[in-house]
């Protein structure tokens, strides 16, 4: 049961498994039919282990864990929850567990989760019991960093990234709030938003209040980060503290608005995005109804349109931030899911595409498991 695309949808979890050449795909599921599934992630330290972020009907948000590649699942004994409010405090409750990230290779069993409203949680036992990360959730600046300016999907904490060289070095994103960095394992945090446009804020140079949609760290070159923002596509090379807007090199008619961004497994200069319409009413659909992926091979200096095999017109696709991924094969393979329930695949790094699933519920995330 290796080589699996996990499809998280508004009505359950599905799998797509390829043959050896990725020419045919077998769709299976659903599991947890009717439950809202936000994210399904494999543990690279224990490949048989998967965690699933779910909202179980009327029973609320939780996490499920599988130790047999998704055949059976066990609910967390203690799902992510904010600490009990003290007298005079406004109580906070987790509405959705939105994002999951496995911990550092040196910390087996450690996982992080992000929620809506924006909260950060940590498990040290493989996802069975979760504790709030006080260094962020109770930070004196948190009410300003995450003031509740929710996106249409709520205020989301996502893109929890861990430096593979240092388990203490973390990043996270908040929509709406910005990008934040910790160098001491989450005990303290600081904004990292310099150079990022914030067209919707009175102060264009505000330190926080931004809307990152998805942040990605290159796995072999962790000083190279990219992110897709409400206001463009950006890149940073640490230890620099200022982001560069590489989306300005996109065709003007296309712009640089979207949700997902995917990085090549070995080359830090290669990335893919799925641009969407960002006009005044923010339709967030494929521009002019003509979907395309755009690829850069030089760190954002130039971009190439990749639309072979995709619909030529009247295809108003929307792809959420977690709904585009790659595999680890040579090429690599790229995959994205749409809010209209379609899954598209490319086995040649985006040069051509074909549909591999249709008629699924609204897709929230697409992730690869070896």
Image (spheres, helix red, strand yellow):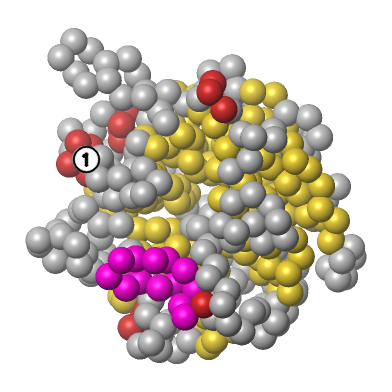
In the displayed structure image, the side of residue 356 where residue 279 appears, left or right = left
Q: Is residue 281 magenta?
A: yes
User: Label 1: how many residues lie within 10 Å, few (<14), some (14-19) or many (20+)?
Assistant: some
Magenta stretch in the rendered image = 268-288
- Compared to residue 74, the image places residue 351 above or below, namely below
Left or right of 193, for residue 63: right
* Front-lying residue, 113 or 323: 323
Which residue, as the protein is rendered here, is positioned at the far right? 20
- Magenta segment includes 104: no
Any part of residue 220 in sight: yes
Q: Which residue is mark 1?
A: 147
Q: Is residue 10 above or below residue 124?
A: below
> Furthest residue to the left?
202
The reply to whether residue 180 is visible in this rendering is no
Out of 103 and 41, give the one closest to the viewer: 41
Residue at image position (64%, 29%) is 64
Q: Identify the residue at image location x=34%, y=66%.
A: 282
Q: Main secondary structure of the magenta part?
A: loop
């Amino acid at each position: 049961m290796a080589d699996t695309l996990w499809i998280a949808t508004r009505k359950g979890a599905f799998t797509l498994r390829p043959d050896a050449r990725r020419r045919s795909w077998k769709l299976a599921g659903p599991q947890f039919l009717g439950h809202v599934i936000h994210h399904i992630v494999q543990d690279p330290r224990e490949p048989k282990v998967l965690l699933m972020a779910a909202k179980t009907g009327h029973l609320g948000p939780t996490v499920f864990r599988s130790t047999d590649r998704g055949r059976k699942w066990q609910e967390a004994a203690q799902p992510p929850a904010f600490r009990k409010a003290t007298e005079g405090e406004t109580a906070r409750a987790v509405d959705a567990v939105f994002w999951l990230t496995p911990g550092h290779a040196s910390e087996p069993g450690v996982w992080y989760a992000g929620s809506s409203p924006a909260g950060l949680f940590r498990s040290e036992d493989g996802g069975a019991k979760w504790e709030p990360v006080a260094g962020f959730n109770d930070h004196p600046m948190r009410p300003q960093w995450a003031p509740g300016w929710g996106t249409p999907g709520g205020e989301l904490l996502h893109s929890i990234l861990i430096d593979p060289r240092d388990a203490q070095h973390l990043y996270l994103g908040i929509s709406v709030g910005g990008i934040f960095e910790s160098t001491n394992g989450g005990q303290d945090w600081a904004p990292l938003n310099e150079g990022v446009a914030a067209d919707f804020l009175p102060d264009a140079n505000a330190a926080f209040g931004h809307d990152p949609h998805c942040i990605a760290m290159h796995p072999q070159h962790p000083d190279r980060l990219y992110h897709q923002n409400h206001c463009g596509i950006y890149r940073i090379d640490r230890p620099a503290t200022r982001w560069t807007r590489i989306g300005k090199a996109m065709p003007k008619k296309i712009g640089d608005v979207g949700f997902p961004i995917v990085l090549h497994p070995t080359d830090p200069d290669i990335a893919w995005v799925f641009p969407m319409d960002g006009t005044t009413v923010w339709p967030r659909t494929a521009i002019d109804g003509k979907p395309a992926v755009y690829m850069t091979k030089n760190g954002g200096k130039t971009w190439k349109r990749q639309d072979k095999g995709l619909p030529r017109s009247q295809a108003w696709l929307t792809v959420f931030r977690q709904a585009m991924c790659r595999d680890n094969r040579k090429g690599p393979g790229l995959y994205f899911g749409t809010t209209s329930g379609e899954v598209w695949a490319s086995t040649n790094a985006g040069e051509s595409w074909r549909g591999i699933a249709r008629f699924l519920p609204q897709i929230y995330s697409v992730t690869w498991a070896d």
